[in-house]
Amino acid sequence: MSDTPRKPGYNPAIDGLRGIAVLGVWLFHLHPPLLPGGFLGVDAFFVLSGFLIHGIVSADLESGRFSFREFYLRRALRLLPNATVTLGVTLVLWNLCLPPNSAIQPGLHGLFTLANLSNLFVWKHLGSYWGDAAESAPLTHFWSLGIEEQFYLFFPALLFLLHRKRWLNLGSLAVPAVLSLTLWIHGSQHHPSGTFYLLPTRAWELLLGAAAAQWARSSPVARRLPRATGWIGLALVLGSLVAVPHADSSLGAMALIPTVGTACVLVSLLQPTHPLTQALSWPALVKLGLMSYSLYLWHWPLIVLGRLQANYRNLPETAGAVVGGILSLGMAYAAYRWVEKPLRDSSRSRPRRLAWLAGGMALTTVLCVLSWRRHSEVDPDHRFEPMTFSGRLYDCSTPQDPHWSESSRYWGCRIPVPPADQPPEPWRTGGLRTSGNSITPRVVVFGSSHALMYSKVIDDLCRERRVPVAFLSAGNGIPALFVNEGSPLFPGRDDGAAFDEARRRWLREWRPETLWVIDRWDAWSGKDLERDLRAFLEEVCPLAQTVILVTQVPVLRVGENENIRGWVHWRRGTDESMPRILPDARDPYRRESVRILQRLQERFPNLRIVDSASRFYREDGSVRYSEGRRFFYTDDDHLNDTGAAEISDLLQPLLPAH
């Protein structure tokens, strides 16, 4: 980072703006409360990219030297070397430092990344940007690079066509930008996950940058803007990084704050004497901006690795993230200095640089395939009995990923699937009724995937007593309470409200003897569980003779995507002793949730509490995840059928008699 490029027209203040954007992303990923809106640095990068690419291509078009071949060769030498090395090193680390099979998903994701399709992989396989799966995957951040690289495929051709037809003007870029923005705002409400990750709904941000560049080139007004414009733009960028919450993917029009702010700053920076130009040319900020691409590539996998290693050693996740973040600064500088700069240095032989790039990509491709196809048995010594998780049979929603049970996380666990003729959304027709739809259920089960894990036990007990039961539980993180209106967890944005209303309607019609309410209560961490649960109980307690809340079992501190039995085998001591696993960092909140449930029991006379959690703690505070040859957990937070059966004696007395 010792030298700053001195190309004609180079403006160091633009690199200073890059430095602010990447610093926001780095701090947010390090510890979100440090900078709640730091993720919006990516949106600022999109505008920057559109602005700069427009400048490069339009300048070449006007001079008559534009070449598609040259453009894509320069892009390849600019973007691919560092990305390829990052990908290769990440896969090596995941193969060497983590349990067997941990690199399978990154291996497949890496192949999508090399094909510039990372955003599609994240959308289909990892889901919401705010979900646990995306937060624990090492290549999640490549989604934004996939969008940029896809944009580069069509945008030069668009500019080339518009230039030849003499249609290249502000309007020709503003119209598609407005169309894409409309899709973005609409999709954020109705299909938030796809809207967040896909080019058609993100193109407006890059086109906004391109439109700003076109206006700056063609309008003399742009160079005479009031100086306050730039400062207002910078205030919008910084304000969004500090103040915008990161609740979910439904940003909607809120994304205009950092993007319009970035565009205002970029146009203002065309005035060399603007004080903002001097401020953003601060050397430290410029140097950070010069290696911003490298830091963006390296920071996320090392932060994720740090968190995982901290979990394995029963240390705070934040401490691991900080160590990973600090290491990423060193790795980013090294890759910038010895990979990125040499391979884009035009004074060096291009054929040799392309040969190095091709060789690196070929080697990384092989590494991706080997990682993807590396399958290790999770219990090679057959230490534990075979296990089954029957939760999917009782899911009355439409699973977002019907193939989730095929991932390495669930290898070695038998997961029965619903029959092919089952309606796609049984909650619309009275849920799943093992006793037949013509019989009014005496028992009803509400809940999330944590209700699904107990459903077979409840079903078996009801069958023994010949008590009709209806299951109105849903996976995908859908909560048991009536809080699903506008939820991004449903295929359609209005389905959440319809789901809640359907459950209300069935309760009013059936008035069951027993209503079970089972949820992942630590999902309310940072929210007001007591308020939301009290409002829910005020509505449902008059509609059932008995309402039963079940406490949440401890969550294993091993990571969201680990195969638990494979992890246990990997961590077993040389004396074959079983590893001690502590609960994760949310355990204090789960214990507090038990007290909240008990306080509410005093207010509602027909409310009962089942303390399932106590069965899965050992005296030393660690988690009782196995006993002899029996293994109790499917993944880090769900019991399998064997584990759920451990509390059948607590459930049985609360069910209606025959």
Image (cartoon, rainbow, N blue to C red):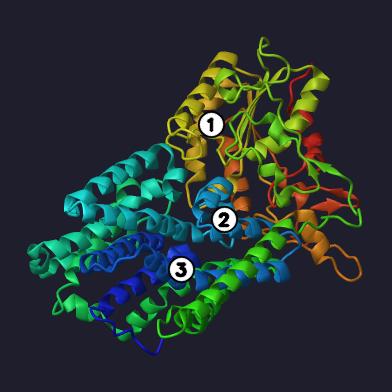
Nearer the observer, 608 or 429: 429
3D distance between C-alphas at marks 1 and 3: 58 Å
Label 3 Cα crowd, 10 Å radius (few <14 / some 14-19 / many 20+): some
* Residue 76: numbered disc: 3
Q: Nearer the viewer, mark 1 or mark 3?
A: 3
Q: Tag 1's secondary structure?
A: helix
Q: Would you say 36 lies left or right of 510 here?
A: left
Q: Quadrant of the C terminus?
A: top right
Q: Would you say 218 lies left or right of 55 here?
A: left
Q: Residue at x 56, y 77 (%)?
A: 356
Quadrant housing residue 101: bottom right
Q: Amino acid at mark 1?
A: Leu
Quadrant housing residue 445: top right
Classify 395 as above or below 239.
above
Q: Tag 2's secondary structure?
A: helix
User: Can residue 305 be seen from the camera position used here?
Assistant: no
Check disc 1 and report the residue beneath it. 537
Classify 80 as above or below 119.
below
Tell which circle, 2 or 3, labels the residue nearer the N-terminal end: 3
Q: Amino acid at mark 2?
A: Phe
Classify 530 as above or below 397.
below
Residue 5 drawn at (x, y percent): 33, 84
Residue 366 drawn at (x, y percent): 67, 64
Classify 300 as above or below 330.
above
Check disc 2 and report the residue beneath it. 112
Tell which circle, 1 or 3, labels the residue nearer the N-terminal end: 3
